[in-house]
Image (cartoon, helix red, strand yellow):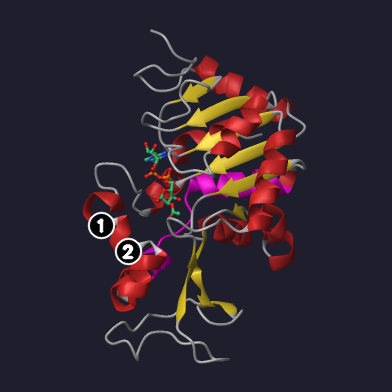
Amino acid sequence: MSGPPGAGPAGPSPDALAAAALALARAGRVVVFTGAGVSAESGVPTFRGPDGLWKTCKPEDLATPVAFGRDPRLVWEWYGWRRAMVGRCRPNPAHLALAQWMLSRPGVTLVSQNVDDLHERAALATAGGAEAARRAAPVRLHGSLFHDHCTRCTYRAEARGAVDASSLAALPHCPECGGLLRPDVVWFGEVLPAPAVEAAFAAAREAEACLVIGTTGAVYPAAAVVHTAKAAGATVVVVDPGETEYDGLADVKLVGQAGAIVPLILF
Ligand code: OAD
């Protein structure tokens, strides 16, 4: 069979797990890049799998600035549903193992495309305090489901309550200027937050190892973090039960679920 070690149909071999663990333990600097799959075992739907969100919902109706301008009530209804659903999910062993690992060793930057806050909640649960949890917090490339920002002024705040999308007037509005609030997530066609992009790519350029978990690697510019790390000489370890855009560049592909595999390779 061709392909990187560990890509066999029976799941990761002990040799592949050991190779991944060694590469991650030896690296002075590691960039971890996560996508929706790291949260799948927590009950958060992915985007592109058979049960993925984009199979039943159209991004152009729900996740673009044009869609929000056309029908903010519909967009808020969807984000309110996701906020409530994801708010009931809990970090799984992959989130928790990553948080413990980051708190126990220096040199790891966690970069996530996820908006579900489960890395942050794992860090809080593991660190036992907000100050320490910051050391295990992710660089968020695509924003957060649990923040809003104003469409008119610079107001931005955490938002965890239920969303009333029954009418335009009931939608969340800015307490400072009265403008319409929107979810603080990056939509298709929008620019990613510059400080997050800078931090993610700086970490990728310096990485000696890159751990990729649960992402198809299909959405740019985020997906380029892994290509940047590879070009800088990093050993790339991919954990995913399916095919990804990174399979051709992975040094080790561990086929399986994040919650089962990630705790086995972080020491
Ligand atoms: P995708 O839905 O494209 O990919 C999810 C990946 O997770 C797939 O490769 C699955 O095989 C894998 N997967 C499923 N279950 C898993 C498990 N238990 N453990 C590990 N992996 C598992 O999601 P992303 O790659 O994250 O963008 O999508 C990237 C971006 O596209 C998202 O951030 C979002 C979306 O449109 C925005 O919202 C801007």
When asked about the image quadrant of residue 177, the answer is bottom right
Residue 95: say if magenta: yes
Left or right of 16? Residue 46 is: left
User: Up-down: is 32 above or below 18?
Assistant: below
Left or right of 162? Residue 205 is: right
Q: Nearer the viewer, residue 243 or 231?
A: 231
Residue at point 37%, 74% (across, down): 69
User: Up-down: is 159 above or below 250?
Assistant: below
Q: Residue furthest left?
A: 56
Q: Residue 155's x, y, as percent?
A: 59, 81
**Residue position for label 1:** 57
Q: Can residue 149 be seen?
A: yes
What crowding class fits label 1: few (fewer than 14 Cα within 10 Å), some (14-19), or many (20 or more)?
A: few
Q: Amino acid at mark 2?
A: Leu
Range drawn in magenta? 83-103
Label 2 residue SS: helix
When asked about the image quadrant of residue 171, the answer is bottom left
User: Up-down: is 120 above or below 76?
Assistant: above
> What secondary structure prevails in the magenta region?
helix
Quick check: marks 1 and 2 in contact, CB under 8 Å? yes
Q: Residue 231's x, y, as percent?
A: 65, 25
Say which label, 1 or 2, has the lower sequence index.
1
| Mark-to-mark CA distance, 1 and 2 | 8 Å
Label 1 residue SS: loop
**Residue position for label 2:** 62
Q: Where in the image, quadrant-wise, is ligand 1 located?
A: top left
Q: Nearer the viewer, residue 126 or 164?
A: 164
Left or right of 36? Residue 109 is: right
Residue at point 42%, 44% (across, down): 37
Q: Can residue 137 be seen?
A: no
**Quadrant location, the N terminus:** top left
Residue at point 59%, 20% (across, down): 18
